[in-house]
Image (cartoon, rainbow, N blue to C red):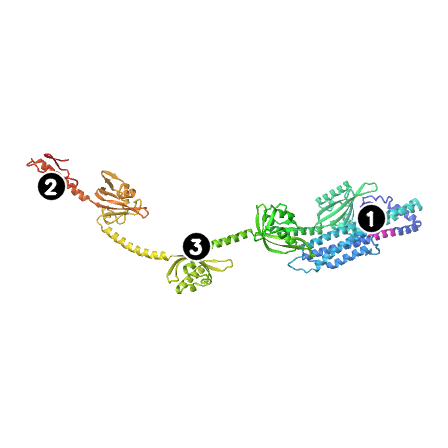
Amino acid sequence: MLPQLFSRMPFMVPLAPLPDPPSAPLGNRRRGFLVTLVLVLLALASAFLLWRINDGWENSYAAYGPTADNVRQTRQAMTQAFLLQVRRREDRAFNGPSVEALLDKAALKLSDAIAGESSLLGIAGHPPEGVLLKQLQEYQRVIFDLDQSLRRSLIAPRDATRPLSEESLVVQLRLFYEADRLGEQIETELTHGLARAVGNRLQEHRAEIALWGAVLLGALALVARLGRVGMAMARQERLIQAILDSTSDGVFVKDPQGRYRMANRAIAAMIGHAPGEILGHTDDALFPAATAQAMQRSDTEVMRERKLASFETIFVDPDGQRRTVWTTKGPLADDWGKIAGVYGISRDVTERKNAEQRLREREDQLQAIIDNINEGVVTFSLDGKVLSWNRAALAMHEFPPSASTTGDLEIFFELYELLDTNGTPLPPSEWPMSRIIRGEHLRDLEFTSRRRDGTWSRTFSCGGRLVMSAEGSPVMGVLSLADISERKRVETELRTSEARFKLFMDNSPSIAWIKDSAGRHVYCSRPFLKRLHLGPDDWQGRTNEELFPGEIGADLSRTDHLVLARGHALETDERTVGPDGEELYWRSIKFPFQDGTGDWFVGGMALDVTERRRAEEAQTRSDEVARERAEELEAVMQAAPIAILLSRDPSCREILGNRAANLLFDAAEGENLATLTSGRSYRRAGQDLGLDDLPMQQAVTQRREITIDDLEVTLPGGRPLLLMGGAAPLLGRNGQMRGAVGAFLDVTRQRQASEALEESNLRFIRIFHSQPPRHQSRHPRRTLGGREPGVGSPLWAFKVRGAGAEVP
């Protein structure tokens, strides 16, 4: 009926260039003349007809107008109450009536609508009947639920640290939308009903006017009818305009060219212009280009498809505010079925969209918080269906982020098994989710979860409980999981490490201890107790002064304090006294450290060096004796008349000699004799020798003693030397070559004397042979001098053979 109503209704403010509507074929002048001509005749008829029309319109409006006004006021009061409650929850300031007053007003106005009461001046209401009454009662039920929910939120104590429940807000928002939908439906039905009633009354009035026109002469009757119809239509327009202006929804009508032919105050307020500034203009003059084009496309689509359609339009009002409008549009057709324009009903849903956006943002924030916490969070319904997993829970179970992990718990019973801390499998009824569904509140419950195929296993610590609604009824369950597999592994490794450390320290040859900052022993290794013959109760909590006598305990404590004061490790030699009074010597390493609570301790390890100390003392005494003997040997070597050479280099590249050697080789004291090669040459048996062919080098190379009696040395200046002597290698205890030693005697003069003697003997022999023989020797084999000729004999070359001697 609404399209037919709009198609028959004159436009509110027609523009001058537009022709009169089809319902007024006669001009205003002619109509005035005819009315004046038949004024007397039509006075009574007009009065009766006007009374009839007025009574019909008032009855029609009384059936729908007061009810529509009460429903509108109910929606406004409930909307304000809900927004005030939302702002109160967000601690936002609000100037206006209280929530309770708005709720009372909404309940009162809805009761008036059902009872047929009217708040419109001069218009009596009628109680609704039939479908409308049922709709109002359903609307009253939803309004009552929303009213109770809001009042409970007001009565509930409010903690600044605990905002109102998100679930309560969701319930209230759902009830508000349901109430708003029903209210809008009822208003739409009332508007359509009023349109239908007005249409019916219009038909009746037309018939009556036609009847009166037939009675009263054709033209006069037609003029009278037009006048009365004009008055009726004006009243109808005022009534309709009053209804349209009283609603919060914007209502408008456009012609096929897109020009506004009607606009109520609500649509004018949405656009930001006065109604007179809108009429006759298109969307291009009122909105930005993009918004206007979108509206024109929707108008064209509605007129082309000839059916209702809804659109969401977003635009910026003159105040710079972004507005969101939900518009339902329908086509307008004239009596011949031709499209005459389009009508629309728009609702500003900016607040609702903002509320939905804030709700989505809060949900996104909550989901972001849940997804970014380290603990896993799993939600599930009361019938055992898994609803959601956060990212941490998926990662703990090695599920990809996009995995679908919802479903019945029976599916998880088939794939996984849970074990308690003793390794005993848990039946499904004892799983954490099952226990939470039964109403248990879990905290720090540890269990091991593993896949039945053995490919995955984790240890968790969980907590959980049921989530309760504002009414105190359970809504769903929440389970939080913390993966403590690594912690359990570390604890196991720590216990193993502690046991290994104890075994290590108990079997170590060194002793170990730990003392607190006051010097009290808190740990002693088993070798410590065994070495000092202490029992389990003899050392715990006791200080050095209590364990060791006199200065010994004081000395130990002084080094402990020194370590704490310096803050770094200290290595020192210490002594203690054994049970038998024997002094024990230790090589100790002490170091400071802190535990997890920040308390300082001194740890230490010590090696028993008593035997080594005694060995060192014995070695010291032996070293002193050896040093004395070495000094004596050095003095003997320096005093020896022969040349003695010593090399501690396995390659004999460094050779030192005693005084006799330095004098022999023209070297300074302490000079390396191995480097004295300039102007020197060495020969033996007529062959030149290199440095590697000398006796000491050969003794090292051949690893044996070398003896030589014919080493010829030529010194700088040409002075010759003839040396005889030997060299021997110096070997370590393990047979390693350490160097060589050599002793050489200068036999140059002895050689020269021998050669002179030989020369003299040869001259004597020649003289002897030059004389005639006087007798023959009775001993032909005996030589002069009475000796057997041989090596070393001055006459070694003289022999008698037969009657004469042989000279080489």
At label 3, counting other C-alpha atoms closer than 10 Å, the crowd grade (few under 14, some 14-19, many 20 or more) is: few
Q: Which residue is mark 3?
A: 507
Image quadrant where residue 442 sits: bottom right
Q: Disc 2 or disc 1, which is closer to the eye? A: 2
SS for tag 1? helix
Q: Which residue is mark 2?
A: 786
Name the kind of residue labelled 1 in the image: Ala
SS for tag 3? loop
- Name the residue furthest left: 774
Q: Earlier in the sequence, mark 3 or mark 1?
A: 1
**Residue 222 as seen in the image, left or right of residue 717:** right
Residue 223 visible: no
Q: Nearer the viewer, residue 644 or 375?
A: 375
Q: Disc 3 or disc 2, which is closer to the eye? A: 3
The answer to whether residue 117 is above or below residue 31 is: below
In space, the residues marked 3 and 1 are separated at their CA atoms by 105 Å
Mark 2 touching mark 1, by CB under 8 A? no
Q: Which residue is mark 1?
A: 195
Name the kind of residue labelled 2 in the image: Gly
**Residue 540 as seen in the image, left or right of residue 310:** left
In space, the residues marked 2 and 1 are separated at their CA atoms by 180 Å
Name the kind of residue labelled 3 in the image: Asn
Give coordinates of residue 5: x percent, y percent: 82, 46
Number of numbered discs overlaid on the protein picture: 3
In magenta, the rendered stretch is 54-64
Residue 546 visible: yes
Q: Nearer the viewer, residue 445 or 658?
A: 445
**Residue 119 as seen in the image, left or right of residue 611:** right
Give coordinates of residue 704: x percent, y percent: 27, 43
In space, the residues marked 3 and 2 are separated at their CA atoms by 87 Å
**Residue 341 as seen in the image, left or right of residue 681:** right
Q: Earlier in the sequence, mark 2 or mark 1?
A: 1
